[in-house]
Image (cartoon, rainbow, N blue to C red):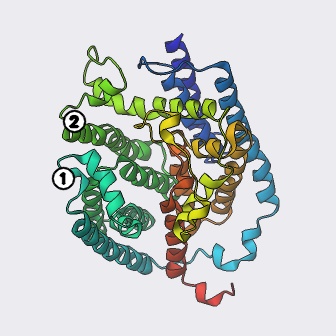
């Protein structure tokens, strides 16, 4: 039965990917959302760990409700934004005339800010996570020691690398013309690797793949030349980074299998090294399941978790959320899909209305890009694609860096837009 469910949901996922590329409502946020969730549901049915809870009927029902809610939200808001494209009233948002020279300027400014952040990170913490003797412990220690702004600046490569690729895609890649951007990108990848964060590199990977699709509009032949490389990078990063962290922190690359009680002794052809991919998907579903069950009988946070990024930035301690993750699940389960913080805030009702609202925002970005493809809309929708794919893993809505990223994109757009000065806000 497990293999049957895995096969069915995998087929559904692949079909949704096809619809995203070729079908009706092409490139809409509906298809990638359904694709990643069908894939996550299918993978979770393999039940490789003895400590994974079997999904009760209620949890199956809530997942189904959440996907229907998202689909309904897409169709409703797609009609609304199609009829009322309010952004058209703000002429500075829809100009397609931007300066590639100014994009390069933005990239170099971000690079300089990143170098400053790296210097501050190293002088305060004394090392980088990947180089530390105990990578896992150091990551959490450094996060506490290094102020959030310096931490964010140190990892600005996650922004200037995609913007470098934006230039290369718009101008058609030329090694001589874009040699500086290649060097900047390689440096950025090296820097992000030092932070031992697979999310950051996967973030760049997805953003770049989406940019290629939206800007170059590749045919099948071009896609087969470009995408396999980035997909292999994704798989390698998502598998290798946690394995390196485990080996440096615990002396064994099999630590993760042990703590999750998965028997990988019979795994063939190196498939055991793909275990982090399985755990990253299935155990985040487990975290969501535990949270849903926990908040059936415990008081909810009533929106405080959702507002945490803003209350933290503004220093409004009296409004911060207060909950015990250890009471919900094991301490090393630190993410639980995009719904997890909303379940803490609103309980089971989050499965009903949160996907609908999220669909509204994502569809707004989709319609903005579809009607007015420019520097801002293309990058925003590429960012949205990353957000969608990561919904099965974690929630970026409670991470301050998402709002800082969006602010940077908007400021960058004002800098690169040639006609911005001519428009009234």
Return the disc, 2 or 1, that comes first in the chain's sequence: 1
Q: Is residue 93 visible?
A: yes
The image position of residue 181, as x and y in percent, is 31, 68
Q: Is residue 24 shown to the viewer in this render?
A: no
Q: Residue at x 38, y 41 (%)?
A: 231
Residue sitting farthest toward the bottom: 422
Between the residue at mark 2 and the residue at mark 1, the CA separation in whole angstroms equals: 15 Å
Q: Contact, CB < 8 Å: mark 2 with mark 1?
A: no
Q: Quadrant of residue 278?
A: top left
Circle count = 2
Left/right placement of residue 369 relative to residue 80 reads left
- The residue sitting at 52% across, 62% down in the picture is 379
Give the SS element for disc 1: helix
Name the residue beneath numbered marker 1: 131
Label of residue 250 in the image: 2
SS at mark 2? helix
Q: Can you tell which mark lies on residue 151?
A: none
As drawn, the residue found furthest toward the front would be 318
The N terminus sits in image quarter: top right
Locate residue 300, reporting x and y percent: 66, 43
Circle 2 packing at 10 Å, graded few (<14), some (14-19), many (20+), is some
- Provide residue 382's location: percent of width, then percent of height: 52, 56
Above or below — where is 353 with respect to 112? above
Q: Is residue 364 left or right of residue 417?
A: right
The image position of residue 408, as x and y in percent, is: 49, 71
Is 124 in front, or is 402? 124
* Rendered residue at 54%/40% (across/down): 337
63 vs 145: above or below: above
Foreground pick, 70 / 122: 122
Residue drawn at x 58%, y 41% is 340
Q: State the image quarter where residue 310 is shown.
A: bottom right
Q: Residues within 10 Å of mark 1 (few under 14, many from 20)?
A: few
């Amino acid at each position: 039965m497990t293999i049957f469910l895995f096969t069915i949901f995998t087929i559904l996922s692949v079909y949704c990917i096809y619809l995203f590329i070729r079908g009706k409502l092409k490139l809409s946020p509906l298809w990638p959302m359904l694709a990643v969730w069908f894939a996550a549901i299918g993978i979770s049915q393999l039940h490789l760990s003895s400590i994974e809870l079997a999904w009760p009927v209620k949890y199956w029902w809530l997942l189904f409700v959440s996907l229907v809610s998202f689909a309904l939200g897409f169709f409703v808001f797609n009609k609304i934004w199609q009829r009322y494209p309010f952004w058209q009233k703000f002429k500075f948002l829809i100009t397609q005339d931007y300066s590639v020279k100014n994009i390069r300027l933005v990239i170099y400014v971000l690079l300089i800010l990143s170098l400053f952040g790296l210097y501050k990170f190293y002088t305060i913490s004394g090392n980088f996570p990947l180089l530390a003797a105990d990578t896992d412990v150091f990551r959490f220690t450094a996060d506490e020691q290094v102020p959030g702004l310096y931490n964010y600046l140190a990892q600005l490569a996650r922004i200037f690398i995609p913007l470098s690729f934006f230039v290369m895609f718009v101008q058609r890649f030329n090694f001589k013309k874009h040699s500086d951007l290649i060097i900047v990108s390689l440096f950025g990848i090296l820097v992000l690797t030092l932070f031992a964060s697979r999310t950051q590199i996967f973030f760049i990977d997805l953003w770049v793949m989406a940019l290629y699709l939206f800007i170059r509009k590749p045919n099948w032949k071009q896609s087969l030349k470009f995408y396999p490389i980035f997909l292999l990078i994704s798989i390698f990063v998502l598998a290798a980074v946690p394995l390196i962290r485990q080996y440096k922190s615990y002396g064994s690359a099999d630590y993760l299998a042990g703590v999750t009680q998965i028997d990988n002794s019979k795994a063939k052809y190196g498939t055991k090294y793909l275990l982090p991919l399985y755990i990253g998907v299935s155990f985040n579903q487990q975290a969501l399941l535990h949270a849903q069950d926990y908040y059936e009988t415990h008081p909810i946070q009533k929106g405080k978790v959702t507002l945490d990024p803003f209350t933290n930035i503004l220093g409004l301690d009296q409004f911060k959320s207060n909950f015990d993750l250890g009471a919900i699940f094991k301490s090393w389960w630190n993410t639980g899909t995009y719904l997890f913080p909303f379940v803490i805030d609103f309980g089971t009702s989050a499965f009903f209305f949160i996907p609908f609202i999220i669909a509204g925002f994502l569809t707004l970005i989709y319609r903005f890009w579809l009607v007015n493809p420019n520097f801002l809309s293309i990058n925003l929708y590429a960012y949205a694609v990353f957000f969608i794919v990561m919904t099965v893993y974690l929630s970026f809505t409670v991470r301050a860096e998402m709002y800082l990223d969006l602010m940077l994109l908007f400021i960058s757009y004002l800098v690169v837009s040639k006609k911005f000065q001519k428009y009234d806000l």
